[in-house]
Image (cartoon, rainbow, N blue to C red):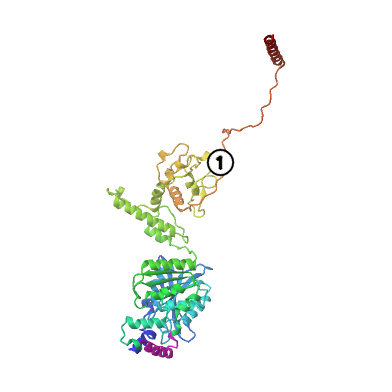
């Protein structure tokens, strides 16, 4: 019984697999992008061969290094356990490196050490990635034994950007004592510690490590790497209190997630989402635009007069098309009357028509909502159909207004009427005479202007102050005293005589009273 328990610790069942059958293909497509698997071999300090795989994008722009996450599998595991990690990390422009630890999978070695010698294997992998100029920073993702390995190595290498630690044990000696009770090994209680001491000597002789050294809690206060802890609430193999002890003693930035499940159960989706967000924040991967083939877009979508340039970022257009298709299908299904198809033509609307209908429903609440479509002269931006010129401004000469029907004046007095412009799918009869937008005679340019309305970023353009109208008069206040007007000679003499008569009459009246 004791011998079986020893083999359970240091010689678990070994995964024997075919890499081409259990791993991702050498070239595969994930989330619309192409990736490749690079298989390689490394040699650790003990001379054991390590079988490794590196998942990278098929094409990477020059001078654009990408971050890398090293996945560390658990006891009796292998590098095939990282298949789920590839789905989480690769779409975020994070490469994935996985390996078979010594004594596991297809790598050399006879015994595992539950993290003690595995940290040296991890050191070998990190040294290899440091020499690669296409790798920017490194993160660790470990599960069970791999989580212990990441903790032990992280205490020695503070340059690691972040770690995800799933179901790690706190102390191997305490774990062995717990497993005796969990698996109901028929050993008298007073002999359990004696049996553990015997197993300690046997393991030290065979696997060349001491189980008493695997006290992970004592390494936690020395580690300052940002870490995300995860543990199943129903794990009976490594109970949740192990993770709590490490989490409480950990010195770096930390967070913990508890989820339903046991030690080997599939992890829930919200846990993988948290892992993806964590690595995105600590690794800061560069934004590499997805390049879509224009022929595929034209194959699956009716682009009408819209021309997609090859080699350009069309992921935003792809999302817009998919969203408009979904909205259009929902409206069609909810309608009580079936849509009529004139002349037997297809009822599927082109992308440009869907864009035009969407723009016609845009609500303009403020006159500044349309500033991102105007240039500095308050003119509408237009997309030129020529491949050599991707953007041109509308003519500014007022004498050309109404000749070719391609101009739309956008002064502050008629911006609301521009929202009903016929070139964006609205009704031109509702437009006022001062801000009317004449129907475009060229439907191709109408579609291009519509696309510009949705593809232009919502930025504000500084506008010049419009000149004040000349006929407008502003009231001015003059605080100076008005000047005295000069009086003519006759007026002065008349005023003097009146004053004299008034003075004489008043004097005569006073004398009469006194008499």
Name the residue at 41% across, 86% down.
111
Horizontal arrangement in the rendering, residue 468 relative to residue 500 (left or right): left
| Quarter of the figure with residue 110 | bottom left
* Image location (x, y in percent) of residue 408: 48, 42
Of helix, strand and loop, which one carries label 1? loop
Q: Is residue 209 magenta?
A: yes
Relative to 455, residue 105 above or below: below
Write down the region rendered in magenta: 192-211
Q: Is residue 369 magenta?
A: no
Relative to 501, residue 248 above or below: below
Magenta-colored segment: predominant secondary structure: helix
Horizontal arrangement in the rendering, residue 225 relative to residue 257 (left or right): right
Is 366 or 353 nearer to us in this picture?
366
Residue 93 seen in this snapshot: no
* Image location (x, y in percent) of residue 393: 52, 48
Residue 369 seen in this snapshot: yes
* Image location (x, y in percent) of residue 95: 46, 71
Question: Mark 1 — residue?
Answer: 466
The 10 Å Cα crowd at callout 1, few under 14, some 14 to 19, many 20 or more, is: few
- Quadrant where the N terminus sits is bottom left
Relative to 171, residue 399 above or below: above
Name the residue at 41% across, 56% down.
320
């Amino acid at each position: 019984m004791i011998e079986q328990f020893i083999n359970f610790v240091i010689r678990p069942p070994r995964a024997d697999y075919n890499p081409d059958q259990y791993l991702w293909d050498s070239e595969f497509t994930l989330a619309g992008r192409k990736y490749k698997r690079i298989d390689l071999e490394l040699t650790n300090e003990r001379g054991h061969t390590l079988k490794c795989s590196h998942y990278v994008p098929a094409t990477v722009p020059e001078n654009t290094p990408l971050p890398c996450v090293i996945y560390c599998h658990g006891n009796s595991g292998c590098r095939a356990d990282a298949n789920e990690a590839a789905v989480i990390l690769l779409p975020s422009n994070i490469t994935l490196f996985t390996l078979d630890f010594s004594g596991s999978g297809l790598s050399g070695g006879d015994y595992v050490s539950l993290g003690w010698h595995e940290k040296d294997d991890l050191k070998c992998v990190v040294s290899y990635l440091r020499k690669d100029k296409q790798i920017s920073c490194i993160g660790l993702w470990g599960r069970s034994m791999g989580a212990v390995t990441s903790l032990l190595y992280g205490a020695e290498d503070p340059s690691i950007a972040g770690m995800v630690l799933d179901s790690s044990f706190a102390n191997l000696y305490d774990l062995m004592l717990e497993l005796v009770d969990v698996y109901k090994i028929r050993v008298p209680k007073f002999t359990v510690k004696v049996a553990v001491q015997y197993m300690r000597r046997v393991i030290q002789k065979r696997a060349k490590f001491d189980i008493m050294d695997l006290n992970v809690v004592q390494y936690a206060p020395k580690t300052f790497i940002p870490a995300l802890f995860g543990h199943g609430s129903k794990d009976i193999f490594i109970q949740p209190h192990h993770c709590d002890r490490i989490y409480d003693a950990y010195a770096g930035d930390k967070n913990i997630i508890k989820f339903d499940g046991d030690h080997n159960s599939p992890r829930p989706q919200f846990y993988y989402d948290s892992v993806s967000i964590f690595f995105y924040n600590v690794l800061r991967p560069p934004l590499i635009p997805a390049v879509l083939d224009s022929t595929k877009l034209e194959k699956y979508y009716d682009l009408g007069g819209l021309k997609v340039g090859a080699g350009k970022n069309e992921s935003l257009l792809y999302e817009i098309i998919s969203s408009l298709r979904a909205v259009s299908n929902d409206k069609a299904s909810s309608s009580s009357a079936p849509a009529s198809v004139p002349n037997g033509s297809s009822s599927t609307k082109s992308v440009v028509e869907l864009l035009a209908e969407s723009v016609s429903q845009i609500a303009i609440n403020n006159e500044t909502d349309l500033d991102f479509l105007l240039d500095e002269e308050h003119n509408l931006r237009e997309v030129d159909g020529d491949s050599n010129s991707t953007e041109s401004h509308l003519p500014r000469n007022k004498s050309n207004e109404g000749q070719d029907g391609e101009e739309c004046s956008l002064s502050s007095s008629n911006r609301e009427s521009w929202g009903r412009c016929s070139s964006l799918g609205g009704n031109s009869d509702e437009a006022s005479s001062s801000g009317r937008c004449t129907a475009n005679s060229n439907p191709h340019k109408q579609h291009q202007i519509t696309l510009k309305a949705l593809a232009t970023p919502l930025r504000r353009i500084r506008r010049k102050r419009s000149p004040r109208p000349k006929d407008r008069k502003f009231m001015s206040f003059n605080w100076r005293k008005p000047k005295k007007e000069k009086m003519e000679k006759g007026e002065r003499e008349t005023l003097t005589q009146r004053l004299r008569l008034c003075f004489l009459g008043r004097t005569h009246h006073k004398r009469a009273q006194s008499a």
